Amino acid sequence: MPTTPTGSPAGPGQQGTHLTHGAHPHVVPRHPRLDPLADRYAARTHGMKTSEIRALFSVVSRPEVVSLAGGMPAVTALPLDAVGSMIGDLVSGMGAQTLQYGSGQGDPRLRERICDVMALEGIRDASASEVVVTVGSQQALDLVTRVFVDPGDVILAEAPSYVGALGVFQSAQARVRHIAMDDDGLIPEALEQALVECRANGDRVKFLYTVPNFHNPAGVTLTETRREAVMAIAERHDLLIIEDNPYGLLGFDHEPMRALRARDSQRVIYLGSFSKTFSPGLRVGWVLAPLAVREKLVLATEAQVLCPPSLTQYAVARYLDTQPWREQIKLFSELYRERRDACLESLDAMMPAGTTWTRPDGGFYVWLKLPHGLDAKRMQPRAVNALVAYVPGIGFYADGSGREYMRLSYCYPEPDQIREGVRRLARVVEAELDLHSTFDAVDTGTFRAVGRRASGHDAETIVGPANSNAYEDGRA
Amino acid sequence: MPTTPTGSPAGPGQQGTHLTHGAHPHVVPRHPRLDPLADRYAARTHGMKTSEIRALFSVVSRPEVVSLAGGMPAVTALPLDAVGSMIGDLVSGMGAQTLQYGSGQGDPRLRERICDVMALEGIRDASASEVVVTVGSQQALDLVTRVFVDPGDVILAEAPSYVGALGVFQSAQARVRHIAMDDDGLIPEALEQALVECRANGDRVKFLYTVPNFHNPAGVTLTETRREAVMAIAERHDLLIIEDNPYGLLGFDHEPMRALRARDSQRVIYLGSFSKTFSPGLRVGWVLAPLAVREKLVLATEAQVLCPPSLTQYAVARYLDTQPWREQIKLFSELYRERRDACLESLDAMMPAGTTWTRPDGGFYVWLKLPHGLDAKRMQPRAVNALVAYVPGIGFYADGSGREYMRLSYCYPEPDQIREGVRRLARVVEAELDLHSTFDAVDTGTFRAVGRRASGHDAETIVGPANSNAYEDGRA
């Protein structure tokens, strides 16, 4: 079966060349005039590229553009005066601590409070000693990857996956193998098939990376039944799981689901963040790991940043101690629910036939699939001309697939802006369809999930959550 | 000449095994019961070890111990009320910015102000576009290393070197080759000899890492003549230099020296920090690099932390805009000068013959060499029993040498505590000498610099700045 794991952008051949040991023949400089150091970079550096999100940054910041691109939380919904005087007091009254170096593992008091937060998702056996505070959960993922992954190792990750995670994996020169999802999240059978095939290929699978709740970018949530199935597979195949959960407390319809980590304390490493429940500008995240791994993570973070910022850690701990943070999370959830509703209602009303999308019940994102033949990346300049921005889907795949997808974020704009943005986007898609139909007959009526034509779950062809008939049914 | 570069703790042989590509045979678990994941870590993880400084942490925090170990700045000398209300106002008035995500490269306004700070050391051509803000200059060094260094590459670094830098290099699986220093800093002839030998060996030298001002841990400063010599060697050998300069503005006797970066904008990557001039608890550092490298660094930091904390960046920019920061640096320098004096006067008065040390004219550290035959690491438990703490020298070498050295920090304790600490330390050394003399005749009178017996500068035997007759002369 030709199911080779998908390589990082550099490609395995190029990696192999760079990683050859022994004599280092001098490489011919690529752009000797532009960059005299071009022949000195590490192998990992050659694969680095600007993310689809950052490429949009300058466009998106123009005020006339409705941005459905960024994942910025609505921080102005915080009680800014109360938070400001709280942080000011921390510096005036406790400057000797808040302005000084701290421990690499992070403030013990904050780590205690983090355990309280995790208890809301059923993690009741965590101890503060197993928690490492990080510079956002991005650093947590980078640390875990550095501790576990050698170049060439395989990481299993949902198709699509969080673009920042793919950046970490690329930087670690890992090979990413995508696992299909549908509207119930990661498909367990596809996971198991990938594990079997990797073993047959002699691939060294280091872990599964998954965002079970309100997935970024797919907007779907792993069901309870599937959580059990995934844990059973992990047990059978001795698989380590990295559970990345920045959005878990931001559900619209029901209580938080029980975390994977709540089901197995040794096999699951859990990543959390205050970026979506409090403030991303403080960059406070964490990782919960078994003690032996915790120790490695502390050494890795000491080599990377010495210690996380003291002031921001004290700010979060004091916020959890003195402010009504649970009520604030409810307030955030209400606000995002209203925006989600604005987004889905506009999509329902305005998008041309053949377009499908997920219906998130929490978090920040809708994952949209264009009618057959359209390409979200190629359409992007026309969308920007029409004053609406989104993130093209290809950034969320390690293998260059996903051109027919886009991510829409409803977290930041006001509902009226969202409606206007979707209206503009719908016109762009319609115009694109018109253009397309003049060159090629588009059969929008027979849109069906790629890969579902075959009977099995082939990792090569099943590449996205919208690849499920359920999405069409859901919209009916 | 058997001058093999010194390997990282893992050793080159072990590295070679871990880095072999192709099939990955299953490794037998090391401690299957203690750590079920022990066979899954990356190759870099096996070499990680607790630093000599962190190992001391619990001991040092006991109030009865005089700690000459930690490098904590005297942050309580800051105007805490003013800084507190300044930061509080930033959150209350600008929460939409200070609590939100920022750009990976860092706040543009702060990067402008950073250029003003660097101008104080003669860097007048830097532009904000060449600056990347980092989570302390530790992250700056980690990013530079990730961008340039593949496993097995050679990094040149002073003997001794900053322990946190060695941690970064170990994590990158680099091989560190130490370059001898004396009281005028890095010895240019030793640098050139190392470059010639590395070329002969086919070693791929990625850069020289150096702390030219008030070196950590050696306490010495690279003279003007040597700066010119080092730059000439860099030019001749096409050598990239990483100039790490956290202490440059904290001189006691003269204006700041002209940075290496001020002499060559393409060949020198400069690392700076607000940890010693303002606050380490904010974790704001930076790197100044040519634009092509800057671009790689931004991609690397986005994969590592997405962006540095917004609040702490705004805090530093506002501090530089509104507070008398130059006067504050003078105040810090006066305070540290007083503590340096207390340290050197006590050492002069109390240390037994045969002990030598450097005489810093800025920064935080004195580097002390014990009389022949004594071992700072083995002596450490007895020092702690005598209620004084220091950092044993071996942590500052990648090759396990330096047992006869220790680092004394005078930055944090009050002058009276410093005197008491040195008094206790002198007694411990005396007792150690007594003990030692009962087993072995110690000829303290003939203490001479190791390696100066030979005519050349042999990188194998010249391992520390106190290895110079000048130190003994200086004490006479």
Image (cartoon, coloured by chain):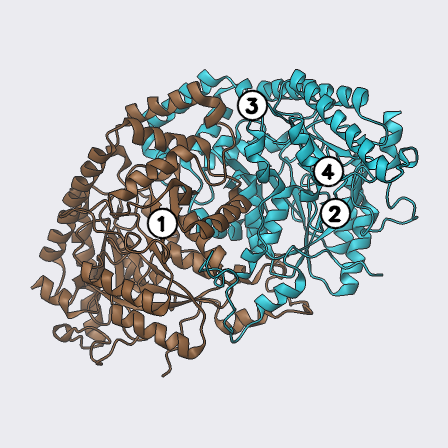
Chain colours: A brown, B cyan
| Amino acid bearing label 4 | Ala
Q: Amino acid at mark 3?
A: Pro
Distance of mark 1 from mark 2, alpha carbons?
39 Å
Same chain for the residues at labels 2 and 3, yes or no? yes
Q: As shown in the figure, which amino acid type bears the numbered disc 2? A: Ser
Mark 1 highlights which residue? A271
Quadrant of the image containing the N terminus of chain A: bottom left
Comparing labels 1 and 2, the label whose residue is closer to the camera: 2
Share a chain, discs 3 and 1? no
Amino acid type assigned to the residue bearing label 1 in the image: Leu
Residue plotted at (50% across, 36% down): A103
Residue pointed to by mark 2: B401
- Residue at the far left in the pictured view: A476
Q: Which residue is mark 3?
A: B63
The disc, 3 or 4, on the residue closer to the chain's N-terminal end is: 3
The relative height of residue A340 versus residue A282 in the rendered view (above or below) is below
The answer to whether one can see residue A302 in this image is yes
Q: Given the image, what chain letter belongs to the residue carrying mark 3?
A: B
Q: Nearer the viewer, mark 2 or mark 3?
A: 3
Mark drawn on residue B376: 4
Residue visible at 92% across and 45% down in the picture:
B453
For the residues marked 2 and 3, what is the alpha-carbon distance in whole angstroms? 31 Å
Which of the two labelled residues, at mark 4 and mark 2, occupies the earlier sequence position? Answer: 4
Q: Are marks 4 and 1 on the same chain?
A: no
In this rendering, the label closer to the viewer, 3 or 1: 3
- Circle 2 crowding by C-alpha within 10 Å: few under 14, some 14–19, many from 20: some
Chain letter of the residue beneath label 4 in the structure image:
B
Dots 1 and 2: beta carbons under 8 Å? no
Q: CA distance from mark 3 to mark 4?
A: 22 Å
Where's residue A240, x and y in %? 38, 61
Looking at the picture, does residue B117 appear above or below residue B142?
above
